[in-house]
Image (spheres, coloured by chain):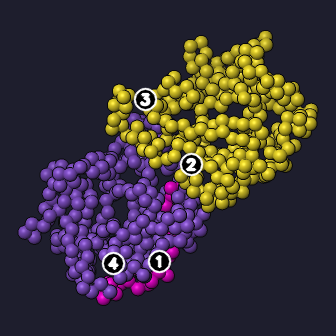
Chain colours: A yellow, B purple
Amino acid sequence: MEKDEDLKDDPIAELITSFNELNAGVVEELDEEPSPLEFMRYVARNTPFVVRGGASDWPAVRRWTASYLRDSLAGHHVNVAVTPYGNADAPTDKDGQLVFAKPHEEEQPFSSFLDYLTSSHSSSSLESRGEVRYAQTQNDNLRNEYSSLYSQVPPSIPFARIALQKEPDAVNLWIGSSASVTALHRDNYENVYVQVAGQKHFVLLPALCQPCVNEQELEPASYVREAGDLRLQSDGGDKVPFAIWDPDNPTLRSTKYSHLARPLRVTLEPGDMLYLPAMW
Amino acid sequence: MEKDEDLKDDPIAELITSFNELNAGVVEELDEEPSPLEFMRYVARNTPFVVRGGASDWPAVRRWTASYLRDSLAGHHVNVAVTPYGNADAPTDKDGQLVFAKPHEEEQPFSSFLDYLTSSHSSSSLESRGEVRYAQTQNDNLRNEYSSLYSQVPPSIPFARIALQKEPDAVNLWIGSSASVTALHRDNYENVYVQVAGQKHFVLLPALCQPCVNEQELEPASYVREAGDLRLQSDGGDKVPFAIWDPDNPTLRSTKYSHLARPLRVTLEPGDMLYLPAMW
């Protein structure tokens, strides 16, 4: 109560509270793709939605299994992000100071990467796993690194292409295990995320929750492999502005507004499509 | 320079400056009405546009002249807002204190109102004019006070009705002279303004210029007629939050951000249609 007393007449607290009152605390679910005009209404309201099964007819969703990918990408090397805890691009403690931890990146034969994922998948304890590997490049990788698979997804999402009058800026394929966690962040892109296989749990905050997330300037640091161990090494570059509050650990590193945030949670199943508005 | 030095690294100043760099300093002009999807793109970008001649076929635009209205509304009384300087709903000095000045409202026979407008129109000096009269009710007046004229405008603007999935909340007719000024303000409505006759000069600021406009809590006051004079009398009600900066008088009552504002100016001619986004 004391906390809320402090925020009486605070315009930012009022804004967040009104937003919570006016908006449902769940992600809207559609059972078919929206028209371009319907989509544009969501863009205008900066509001996410899920199309359950919206991509279930995509060849990628119907075909891609571990063994199919192993065959298709036999002999290919892929970029793999390696971290000790699945904390790629995440605020991480380094000698008592919070830094922005970038993963160690290495090229691995796709088959070795997949072996590691599928075996680590079966082991649930962090200790026995040793490290977390995640293919997470964001450089339009499905039209580059994984171009042999590109024909199995549509070249664009028609409702978004027509509404936004733009071809996709980037088409990315991410392959990880349940150990991969993406830290709370935001992108200045309209995103359509499609779950091809497995599940992903999203925790979403609206753009106006910016005062809740405790954005700080963090020193960048990168993991390096040294004698088999992963060690975090300062990069010495420009500081990175990044949210250090974690809605899954809400009392840690909070701001006076964090407790007002009402994160939306949604789990995607294979074939589901999520519209993630810019700045969420 | 000193002013700008103060604003170095100020995130609000950066936001306004980036907005100015990324957006044209003029209102976009279309030569035909947009489709619902095209309109929704403007709504999503919170960006105004003008459709030149977009309403030129409306019966209202083709028919309404002073003499036509005089005949149509013969015997009708209308609500008229009366102020000494055209300052209805405007920040106004009262004994050295800035108050929110509401007009004196009175019912007048439409013909007397029109006589006053057309005669005051020919007199350019404030002194000889005495007072400014403006029919400016915003209570859906074209479907109430002026309902006999309602059939001469379309019941809705189709591109907006389809895009926003809503019939108009209100349809208002405003009748004034060149002496009527509307103080800088914002509404939480998507507005389509149609110029039926005469001209109107708009000065528009984007919603993010909120820090430029110096919003203050003003005591409400109303003009009352006393022995032929208009006197401003305190209402004693709740204070009204209102912008006290005027982009046409930019050095007066400014904030440290006001000089960064780049107001968009546009003049409407008969038949022109202006989309005014919510919060502009």
Q: Give how far across and how far down residue B181 sits, in percent.
A: 30, 65
Residue at image coords 28%, 72%:
B135
Q: CA distance from mark 1 to mark 3?
A: 50 Å
Q: Which residue is mark 4?
A: B146
Question: If you read the primary sequence from the N terminus, does the residue marked by circle 3 or circle 2 appear first?
Answer: 2
Q: Chain of mark 4?
A: B
| Vertical order, A176 against B32 (above or below) | above
Q: Is residue B123 visible?
A: no
Image-quadrant location for residue A231: top right
Q: Chain of mark 1?
A: B
As helix, strand or loop, the secondary structure at mark 2 comes to: loop
Question: Is residue A74 at least partly visible in the picture?
Answer: yes
- Residue occupied by mark 3: A256
- In this rendering, the answer to whether A56 lies above or below A8 is below
Looking at the image, residue B278 lies above or below residue B60: above
For the C terminus of chain B, the image quarter is bottom left
Highlighted range, magenta: B45-71
Q: For the image shown, how many numbered marks are present on the structure? A: 4
Secondary structure of the residue carrying tag 3 is loop
Circles 3 and 2 on the same chain: yes
Whole-angstrom CA distance, mark 1 to mark 4, is 14 Å
Measured in 3D between alpha carbons, the distance from the residue under mark 3 to the one under mark 4, in whole angstroms, is 52 Å
Residue type at tag 3: Lys
Mark 4 crowd level (few <14, some 14–19, many ≥20, 10 Å Cα): some
Q: What residue does disc 2 label?
A: A47
Position of the N terminus of chain B by quadrant:
top left
Relative horizontal placement of residue A219, taking residue B132 as reference (left or right): right
Q: Amino acid at mark 2?
A: Thr
Q: In front here: A68 or A189?
A: A68
